[in-house]
Amino acid sequence: MRKKQKRILLWGRGDLLSSSVELFLTKQKEWHVFNLLNDENPETLIKKVAELCPDVVIVYRWGYAGDLNLPTNLIQGRPGLKVIAVNPENNVVEVYSKQYITVKSASDLISVVKADMLNSIEY
C-alpha cells in the first residue's frame, strides 16, 4: 500500500533561497511541491490553498509584511494544515497549525497547555 503524497505549497520570491528550499523539498520522494511566486497578492495564495488543499504551506516573512494575519487566514477552516513562516533575516521559523481537541474536564485542558509548554522553544 502506497503512502499518500504530502502536498506542499511554497510561496517564495523565486530567488536563490526559495529555489534552494524547493530543491531540498522536491528531493523527498513522498512530497509533491507546488511553487507559487509571491509576486502575487496574498488573496491569490489563499485561493491556491483552497484549490490545492496542501498539507503544508511555506511562506516567507517578507512576502506578506502588510498582512500579519496571513498564516491565521490560511489555516482558518482547514484543520490539519500547517503553515510555516520563514524569516530569512534571523533564521527563525514560525509554525502555525490548528488543532481540534475535545476537552471533557479541566485535566484535559491542563494536558493541552502542558503539551504546548513542552514543545515550545525559547530563543
Image (spheres, rainbow, N blue to C red):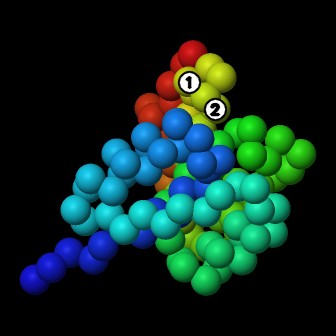
* Residue that carries the numbered disc 1 in the rendered image: 91
The spot of residue 83 in percent (x, y) is: 58, 54
Examine the rendered structure and indicate whether residue 77 appears above or below residue 31. Answer: below
Quarter of the picture containing the C terminus is top right
Question: Mark 1 is on which residue type?
Answer: Asn
Residue 114 in the image: state x and y as whole percent: 49, 37
The residue shown at (10%, 83%) is: 1
Q: Report how far apart the C-alphas of labels 1 and 2 lie in the structure.
A: 6 Å
Locate residue 112, reporting x and y percent. Answer: 51, 48
Quadrant housing residue 47: bottom right
Q: Residue at x 52, y 37 (%)?
A: 16
The amino acid on which the numbered mark 2 sits, given as a three-letter code, is Asn
Of residues 46 and 13, the one drawn nearer to the viewer in this rendering: 13
Along the viewing direction, whichever of 72 and 15 lies nearer the viewer: 15
Where does label 2 land, which residue? 87
Q: Is residue 27 left or right of residue 1?
A: right
Q: Position of residue 119 (x, y in %)?
A: 45, 35
Residue, far left: 1
Res 47 visible:
yes
Mark 1 and mark 2 in contact? Answer it, CB < 8 Å. yes
Point 42% across, 69% down: residue: 7
